[in-house]
Amino acid sequence: MVRTYVARGVENGRVGLLMASGVLAAAQIGKAIISIPLIRAEMDIGLDLAGLIVGTFATLGATFGIGAGVLVQSIGARKSLAGGMTCIAVGNLIGSAAPNEWYLLFSRFTEGVGFLGVVLTIPSLLATSVDRDRRDFVLALWSAYMPVGIALMLLIAPLLSTIGWRLLWIASAGVAGLFAVLLFIAVPSITTNIAQRRTRWFDDVMTIVRQPYSSALAFAFFAFSFQIFSMMFALPLVLTSVHGLSVTSAGLLSAAMLAAAATGNVSSSFLLRSGVPIWANIASAFFVFGVSSFVVYSATTPLPVTLVFASLALGIGSLAPGALYAAAPEAAPQPNRVSSTIGLLQQASNLGQFTGPLVLGIWAEHFGWSAAPSILVPAALFGLLIAVSIRGLGYPRKTQPVNSG
């Protein structure tokens, strides 16, 4: 009995470390967001290059997501996690001493490589580190890593004018270096059975892409990221240009909205554990995204109503990634291709993260914010169709309620 409790405690400690590592990786995105005003003032860079500095992670993920997943699976979890955190630490150190924007951009590229190494490894490691009856719950909980990491950085934004962005980069390097050591110690050197000879990279990728379940999940993740990152991009601008709020007030309210997104991620884990089907979580998210777009972007909507519907969209909309991450292990064509399958989802997510704000920004620039539903509603309907198709495909394993006893 004592041995069982000790084993469960070690497992829970490892899960906690992995979750915290994901939050730390995501915090590097929030770090760039809050630092850009100071960086622009110091280096005199334009919005285009500033956007590239912030969006480097999304660009890398959109380009190399599934390929990085294959590489992560090949080199193993310990090397990927410890190496990824080391890259994040090194990238921060380079950035803290960057004399110009090009050194800073290189540092962000280095961080981005580390980010992919971390976030592509953790979900598959979580899937194999916990009991099957807790897997959906843990993977859905993992999906909150992005909003939690970004929100934590937004909370320290008021201190940035005092400490400076370079000191923040140095502090991030120190924390990432510490996590690299902890992960190297805590993660076993062999976590999955990859004794079989690896197929060629292209064959591995094509095997995953041709799986209908994997492709459906990837399309759903693209549609989700398109929706949620469009709203994260647009909300501060809507609050300032439509409702007349100050930049500071709009930023604080937008940060509070991220808490709603994290709540939705966590709620998904409880819904899956209680037996709500994966497809239902995804469908609910896109239904609310579609409806809320008519309210949030309307110039006639009162501010309190805008905030309520934005919170609902980010909260209920964030049920989707938890369900998608939980579905990934079962959608993988073979157990040793879970990381590659998650890489496909990550690539689809980053494509949505990249294209959503871009398309919505161009559309709003020409037709105004009130025209946003003509872009967002079709994207939400597309997501609903994918959710229905996931149900129609006869998903390999239906989520079942877990007995409390």
Image: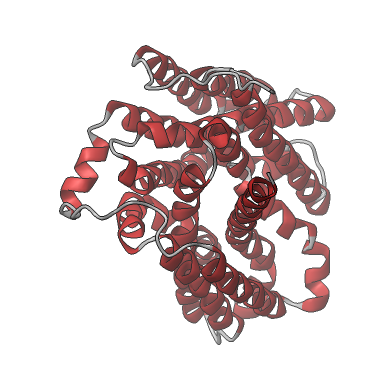
- Residue at x-position 79% and y-position 43%: 253
Q: Nearer the viewer, residue 48 or 64?
A: 64
Task: Report if residue 111 is visible in the image.
Answer: no
Residue 161 in the image: x percent, y percent?
A: 80, 72
Q: Quadrant of the C terminus?
A: top right
The answer to which image quadrant residue 71 occupies is: bottom left
Q: Nearest the camera: 23 or 94?
A: 23
Instruction: Tell me: residue 173, above or below residue 194.
Output: below
Tell me if 172 is positioned left or right of 52 in this view.
right
Up the image or down, 385 lies above or below 108; here it is above
Q: Residue furthest front?
A: 1
Question: Residue 327, position in %: x, y?
Answer: 45, 31
Q: Quadrant of the N terminus?
A: top right
Q: Name the residue at 58% across, 17% down.
A: 276
Percent of width and height locating residue 199: 16, 51
Q: Is residue 370 left or right of residue 116?
A: right
Seen in the picture, residue 150 relative to 295 is either above or below; the reply is: below
Looking at the picture, the colour scheme in use is: secondary structure
Give whichever of 138, 253 is nearer the camera: 138
Residue 369: x and y, percent? 61, 33
Which of the 4 quarters of the picture holds residue 29? bottom right
Q: Is residue 128 visible?
A: yes
* Marker count (numbered): 0
Q: Residue at x 82, y 44 (%)?
A: 245
Quarter residue 401 falls in: top right
Q: Is residue 351 above or below residue 63?
A: above
